[in-house]
Structure formats: structure tokens, C-alpha cells
Amino acid sequence: MFTLREILEKIAKNELSVDEAERLLHFFALEEIDNCAKIDVNREFRSNVPEVILAEGKTNSDLIKITLRLLEKRGRVIVSRCSPEQAVGLKNTLSESVLIQWHDKARMMVIKKTNAPVSAAGGKIGVLTAGTSDIGVAEEAKIVAEELGCVVLTAYDVGVAGIHRLWAPLKDFVLKDVDCIIVVAGREGALASVVAGLVDVPVIAVPTSNSYGFGEKGVSALMAMLQSCSLGLAVVNIDAGVAAGAVAALIANRAAKFRK
């Protein structure tokens, strides 16, 4: 990795183009906040995925500091796993001129300056859940994908215990030509394997912790998804809705880029 001075010297010697230098400079944008956090304000420039603040485990004071700094630098903040108490603290601190979206089921807050709209990127994603108890994780994925400019179609509670419920939404996804499908399931996680065996687009499986007994807390679902014999299926971690939404959006937006 070059130092800032080395990058400038290479530009002066015509050894680096302006575009190449800009890509290298993206790595210099870390903001340190009171020795409690280092936020990557240019993550979205490098990877097309914004910095997401995990509220879980943070004090209200630290969460507010981090949120305000990122809002100042980027104009938009996505806060995940946010408790109602933390959400109230943020709302009471933020200016009335800021747009606040609170998503109760996902426990997620999206905060934007009014001049920071999301541009449509063209990607299309389908999101399925096996059960109603999986909706919170699915909504996490949906919100992240939408904040990355995707159109997201959803169909919830269509698991294999009543497999007939799956046909109509899956047909709709295929007819609308989605670029990938996220499948969120707990218990034995079978829905992901079924879907991957029926479609010709990538499927991202998200095991949820909504299970009990042997293989509780999502372990059975994770193992089953990893052991799936359906090709075209990838798996993220237990309850990792944010990760699934980001991966799906990168796939979908890349497909949309070459579709134009």
C-alpha cells in the first residue's frame, strides 16, 4: 500500500492516472471517534456497500456519536439491531430536518439528509421466508438491498410445511426476472434447497435462530443449508440478514449493469 505522499509523487510523474489515484485514496478515509470507534466513511466508494452501524452492544452515547459523525460525512446512516430505547435516543438527538425511517420488524433505522436520495441501480431481488418468525431477518436483507438501489419483491410464510404456498410467489419472481433470490428459514432450513433446485438464478440462504431442541438456535438450519445438494446455493451466517442483502444487491446490480 502506498503512502499519501507516494501517491502524489506518482501522479506528478505521470505514473498514476487520476482515476487510479482516486481508488487508492479511498483507503485513507477512516474516522476515529473518541477512541470508541473507527468508521470507514469511504467503504461505499470502494465496495458499493455502505458502512452499517451495529447498534447491539453499544451504549446510547457511543451510538449517537458514531451516527452523527457518519451522517455528517456521508449524508446517510444505516443502523442495524437497534433496540427501541436506542431508537428513541437517536430520534431525540437528530435534527428535525433529517429523514428518519424506523423499521420495527427489522429493528433497523435508516437516517438521511434530505439531499441524499437512493439512486436506482436496476437490480431486482426476491426475498422468501419459510415462516412468519423469519420475517425480521428477511426485512433486514430487504432494507439493505433497497438502500443499495435494488427493487425487492417479497413473499413471506411459504415454507415446505405447506409447499403449495411457494408456487405463486416463485412464479412471480421468475416472470419478473429477478437477478437473485434470498431464502430465509429456520428449523431444518429446507426451503432454500427446494428453491435453488427450481430456479436459474443465484440463491442466498439465510438460516435463522428460530428453532429449538436438537440443533437449536439455527444450528440445524445452517448445517442443512451448507449440506444442500442443490447447486447455485450460497449460505450466510445465522440471522445474517444484512450480509445477505448486501451480497444479493452486489449480484443484482452487477447483472443490471450489463443488462443495460
Image: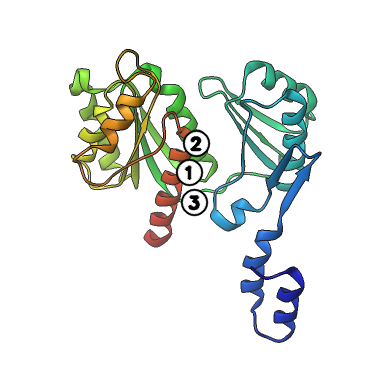
Residue 7 lies, in percent from the top left, at 71, 74
CA separation in Å, label 3 and label 1: 13 Å
CA separation in Å, label 1 and label 2: 6 Å
Residue at 59% over, 46% down: 50
Circle 1 packing at 10 Å, graded few (<14), some (14-19), many (20+), is many
When the figure is inspected, residue 74 is found, relative to residue 212, above or below; the finding is below
Q: Which residue is mark 3?
A: 121
Q: Quadrant of residue 45?
A: bottom right
Residue 110 lies, in percent from the top left, at 62, 33
Q: Secondary structure at mark 3?
A: loop
Q: Secondary structure at mark 1?
A: helix
When the figure is inspected, residue 1 is found, relative to residue 143, above or below; the finding is below
Under mark 1, the amino acid is Ala
Residue 155 lies, in percent from the top left, at 34, 27
When the figure is inspected, residue 55 is found, relative to residue 31, above or below; the finding is above
Residue at 34% over, 13% down: 212
Q: Tell me if label 3 and label 2 are in contact, CB under 8 Å.
A: no
Q: Tell me if label 1 and label 2 are in contact, CB under 8 Å.
A: yes
